[in-house]
Structure formats: structure tokens, C-alpha cells
Amino acid sequence: MRLPEIYAANPFALSFELFPPKTDKGADALFRHAERLVEFKPSYLTCTYGAGGSTQDSTLNIAARLRRQFGLPVATHLTCVGRTADQIRDYLRRAIDADVQNVVALRGDPPKGESKFTATEGGFAYANELVAMIRSDFPEMGVAVGGYPEVHQEAPSAEVDLDNLKRKVDAGAHAIITQLFYDNEDFFRFRDQCESAGVKVPLIPGLLPVTNVSQIKKIASLCGARLPERFLADLESCGGDADRQFEVGVRQATDQTQQLVDAGVPGIHYYVLNKSEAAVRVLTDVRL
């Protein structure tokens, strides 16, 4: 099932993002956690795609295995980094052969050691170009794109960032999955801006439950997400107590989730970092 049908058929579509592990042991652990997450009946699962396409084969192998093992729709991430258009088309053909029917289409971050994105010769410079090619050459695939409630770090303004998003939607994207955020007001403001701009596809909040304060500080700094002062103070008051940090993070994610569900969002996409404990706690406590 493709993303447009998923969101049309479900008043609320739950989804989880996983990433390709580096070892067989990591893969075994991933599927143990996935089994627990699948108990909450997600509408689909996604698998990330490494910088510069570094996990291309692993991404597709994991996505295909998820599809076979759980019978759920799956999406592969796909970026413009380090690949020509023909190489990307080849990847998409292999995805279709593996019954991977959906794509999360992204421009991608600059390769490690580089501060600026540079398009590969014969490739794409922007995500909207990637979306347009997928919709033209692979119309059987569903396409999601990224959105940024707190503005993409490279965008000079919120207005420019919204224009970029609108181009991706106009190119044929079926849904928008947001970058992680920790203040729902940022999401609601972004939702209003999208509606004013005529963006009509489902806008899906992306949430990352916090389980470790040092880890989330690093992740937030990389993606430009703001940690509310009270939330950060509560996390830091735990000192080095990992269990207390976990409880504070779960409480925050549960409150965030419930408020978003009550506000009528069409779904929530959880960045689970190949773990299940925090998401399980959150989804056990909320009223979906």
C-alpha cells in the first residue's frame, strides 16, 4: 500500500523509523525491537539511508526484510547525495522488485567533512527534482518529504523554507514528515503556515522520545531542534541517572503525543533509534 492510500484509509496512521545496523548482532536486535513495536499496529515502517548512499544496500535489505517479516508497507529513505539520476533510478527499480512501495525523498546532508551540499554531476540538486523524477518514472511509488517546524538550518528564512517545501509538494509528494521537535507550538505554527501556503497533503509530526540527555543535545544541535528550557532543566536535574532521564523523556513524549492526537494530527512518526522501550511506554499511556 502506498502512502496516499495509507493516509486516506486511516484517520490516524502510526509509523516508525529504523536505520540499518552495522552488524548481524545489531540486525537481530533491530528485529526484536521491531516485533515489539509492530504490536501497536503501525501503518508503515521506514528505513533510513546513510550519508552519500553509504548504506544503500543495507537500507534496501532491511526494508525488504521488514516487508516480508511483518507484512506492513515500508518506505526506503533516498537522498540526492553522491548518486546520478540513473543510479537513483536503478535503486528504485530494485526497491520495487523487493516490494518496497514508498520512498522518503530527501536532498540529504553534505557528505562528512564537507560544509556545503554539492550536486553530483548528472544528479539532482534539490529534493523537489528527486520527487518529480520519482512521480514521473515510478508513479506506482508513494512519496514522503521532510518538513521543518523550526526551519531548515540552511534556509535564510522561514518563508524561503516554506517555499522549498511547497515546491516538493507541487512536484508530487504525497505526505510531509517533520523533523523532530519538542514544543508542539512550533508544530502548530508550522501547520498553520502550510495551510496558508496551500499545502494540502498530510503533515505528520516526527517525534524522538528522549532517553539520554547527552545524546539528545547532540542530535538537537545537528538538526536545529530546540529543547524547551523546562524540559532541559528536568533532564539535567537527573544528573547521571539514566533511569530518571528515561522517565523524564517518556513523560515529555507522552504529553506531546497526547496533545498532538487530541489536536487531530493525521499520524505520528516516531524516530526510535532501533529501540522500542520508550515508544512502547509512550504508546501504552496515550489514548490513540
Image (cartoon, rainbow, N blue to C red):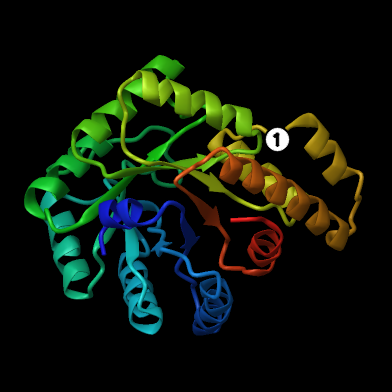
Screen quadrant of the N terminus:
bottom left
Question: x, y (%) of residue 154?
Answer: 44, 26
Q: Residue at x 32, y 28 (%)?
A: 199
Question: x, y (%) of residue 23?
Answer: 50, 79
Q: Is residue 204 left or right of residue 134?
A: right
- State whether residue 227 is above or below residue 256: above
Query: Dot 1, crowdedness within 10 Å: few (<14), some or many (≥20)?
Result: some
Q: According to the image, label 1 marks what residue?
A: 227
Asked where in the image residue 88 lies, by quadrant, the reply is bottom left
Q: Amino acid at mark 1?
A: Leu
User: In the image shown, does 72 or 154 lie closer to the viewer?
Assistant: 72
User: In the image shown, does 203 or 275 lie closer to the viewer?
Assistant: 203
Screen quadrant of the C terminus:
bottom right
- State whether residue 184 is above or below residue 91: above
- State whether residue 57 is above or below residue 154: below
Question: x, y (%) of residue 267?
Answer: 47, 50
SS assignment at label 1:
loop
Question: x, y (%) of residue 11?
Answer: 42, 51
Q: Residue at x 32, y 61 (%)?
A: 76
Total number of numbered discs in the rendering: 1
Extreme-left residue of the structure: 137
Q: Is residue 243 left or right of residue 250?
A: right
Q: Residue at x 62, y 69 (%)?
A: 276
User: In the image shown, does 125 or 112 lie closer to the viewer?
Assistant: 125
Q: Is residue 81 left or right of residue 261?
A: left
Q: Is residue 260 left or right of residue 237?
A: left
